[in-house]
Amino acid sequence: MTPKVIHKRTFSCANDHPIVYYTFDENNKAMCEYCATHFVYEEERTPSQEMQDKLEPIPCPMHEDMIKIILVCATIIISVSIWRYYSPYQTFMRDCIYNERYEWDLSKEYCTWHYKELLKEDSWLKEFLEN
Ligand SMILES: [Zn+2]
C-alpha cells in the first residue's frame, strides 16, 4: 500500500476507528496504530515550485550571448597577444634579452638594429611605437 502524503507535521487518522493524532518523527514516516496506514511527511510545495519541477530546462538566450561575447573577447585578447609577441619590436627586444641572458651568439648588429632604427629621422619603428 502506498503511504499517504501529509504536508503537516501533526495529523490525525480516523479510518473506522476513533480519531488519533500523530506527529512525524525525524524519519518523516509514521504508521497508524489502529489501521496500520502508512504516512509520509513531505514539505508543502508552492504552485510555482511544482511548475518549475515540470518545466523542461530551456537554454537561456542571455547566457548564450554571454558565452559568445566571452569567446570573441578571448579571441581578440589572444590575437593581440600573439601579434604583440611576434611584432618586430617585441621580437627584437626578446631575442636580444635572451641573447645576453643565455649567451646566444646573435650579432651585435642584430641587437642594435632596433636602436639604430629608432635614431633614424624617418624611422618606421619610431612611428610604430609612437602611435
Ligand atoms: Zn488509522
Image (spheres, rainbow, N blue to C red):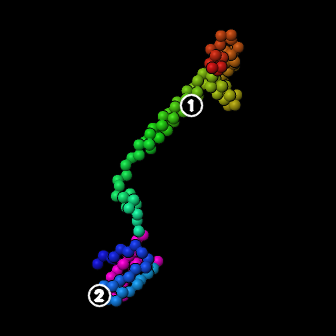
Around disc 2, counting alpha carbons within 10 Å, would you say few (fewer than 14), some (14 to 19), or many (20 or more)? few
Q: Main secondary structure of the magenta part?
A: loop
Around disc 1, counting alpha carbons within 10 Å, would you say few (fewer than 14), some (14 to 19), or many (20 or more)? few
Which span of residues is magenta-colored? Answer: 26-43
Residue nearest the observer in this picture, 72 or 121 = 72
Circle 2: residue type: Asp
Which residue is at the far front? 19
- Please state the horizontal and vertical placement of residue 21, each as a whole percent of the image: 40, 84
Mark 2 in CB contact with mark 1 (< 8 angstroms): no
Query: Is residue 48 part of the magenta span, yes or no?
Result: no
Residue at 38% x, 74% y: name it: 6
Quadrant housing the C terminus: top right
User: Badge 2 is on which residue?
Assistant: 16
Which residue is at the far top? 121
Q: Counting residues from the N terminus, which is met first, the one under dot 2 or under dot 1?
A: 2
Quadrant housing the N terminus: bottom left
User: Badge 1 is on which residue?
Assistant: 81
Provide the secondary structure element on which disc 1 rests: helix
Taking the image as shown, residue 63 lies to the left or right of residue 118, namely left
Residue 37 to residue 129: above or below:
below
Taking the image as shown, residue 55 lies to the left or right of residue 62, namely left
Residue at 33% x, 76% y: name it: 4
Q: Label 2 CB, ligand 1: below 8 Å?
A: yes
